[in-house]
Image (cartoon, rainbow, N blue to C red):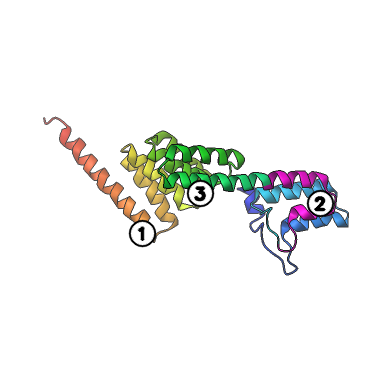
């Protein structure tokens, strides 16, 4: 999160057609040491810079042209991992369409190993675990999603759904409400919140009715 705040627009294109990532590499042509350039490149990638972007040339092509061996090695590794992650996500989406949630969860887990900072992967894995009736794992994945992207309502939706599945209606209400505070006009979140409230009321009445009378 701190790196993303330091580089809020890691893919912004300048009037000259360059990005912060390509600028970091071009700096070596003006005497900036490759080690310094590599540090900047790593920070930008961590902040979300796209190594596959090519307004004029890709970062990898630029690094090769300047003979930046360490940068080439790093960018090649990141590019391979990102491309592999996209492929794994595609496999997972196809598995979900077949309702093969176990298979999909495996693909998402492999993608997470490549990019543990991608909140969407945890959100999708939470969905799979919930469909597999593994509520604890679904909840853990949802909490990780929220930790990575606290401003994204999907994580709170996943958390609420996981808590609903184990009849923790109070916890589900809190999760859905947190999501509504981020997006007050979200109709889907309002609907599930009201469902959780109704279930909480029913549960309260059931518990009250089951108590022995004096």
Q: Is residue 77 magenta?
A: yes
- The residue at 74%/50% (across/down) is 41
Magenta region, main secondary structure: helix
For the record, the magenta segment spans 55-79
Locate residue 54 relative to residue 110 in the image: left or right: right
Q: Is residue 13 magenta?
A: no
Outermost residue toward the right in this view:
31
Q: Earlier in the sequence, mark 1 or mark 2?
A: 2
Relative to 109, residue 179 above or below = below
Q: Position of residue 98 (x, y in %)?
A: 41, 45
Closer to us: 68 or 183: 68
Q: Residue 64: which disc?
A: 2
Q: Position of residue 160 (x, y in %)?
A: 38, 45
Which label lies toward us, 2 or 3?
2
Q: Which residue is mark 3?
A: 150
Locate residue 33 relative to residue 157 in the image: left or right: right
| Mark 1 → mark 2, Cα distance in angstroms | 50 Å
Residue 196 visible, this orientation: yes
Q: Which residue is mark 1?
A: 187
Q: Position of residue 21 (x, y in %)?
A: 73, 55
- The residue at 73%/66% (across/down) is 17
């Amino acid at each position: 999160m701190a790196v993303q705040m330091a580089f809020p627009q890691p893919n912004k294109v300048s009037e000259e057609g360059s990005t912060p990532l390509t600028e970091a590499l071009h700096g070596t042509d003006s005497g900036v040491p490759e080690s310094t350039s590599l540090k900047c490149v790593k920070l930008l990638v961590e902040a979300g810079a796209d190594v596959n972007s090519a307004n004029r040339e890709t970062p990898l092509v630029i690094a090769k042209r300047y003979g930046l061996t360490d940068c080439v090695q790093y960018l090649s590794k990141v590019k391979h991992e990102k491309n592999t992650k996209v492929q794994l996500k595609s496999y997972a989406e196809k598995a979900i369409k077949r309702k093969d949630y176990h298979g999909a969860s495996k693909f998402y887990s492999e993608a997470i190993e490549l990019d543990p900072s991608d909140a969407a992967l945890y959100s999708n894995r939470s969905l799979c675990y919930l469909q597999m009736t593994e509520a604890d794992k679904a909840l853990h994945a949802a909490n990780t999603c929220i930790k990575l992207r606290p401003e994204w309502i999907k994580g709170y939706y996943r958390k609420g759904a996981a808590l609903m599945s184990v009849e923790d209606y109070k916890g589900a209400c809190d999760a859905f409400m947190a999501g509504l505070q981020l997006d007050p006009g979200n109709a889907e979140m309002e609907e599930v919140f009201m469902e959780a409230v109704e279930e909480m009321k029913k549960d309260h009445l059931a518990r009250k009715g089951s108590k022995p009378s004096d």
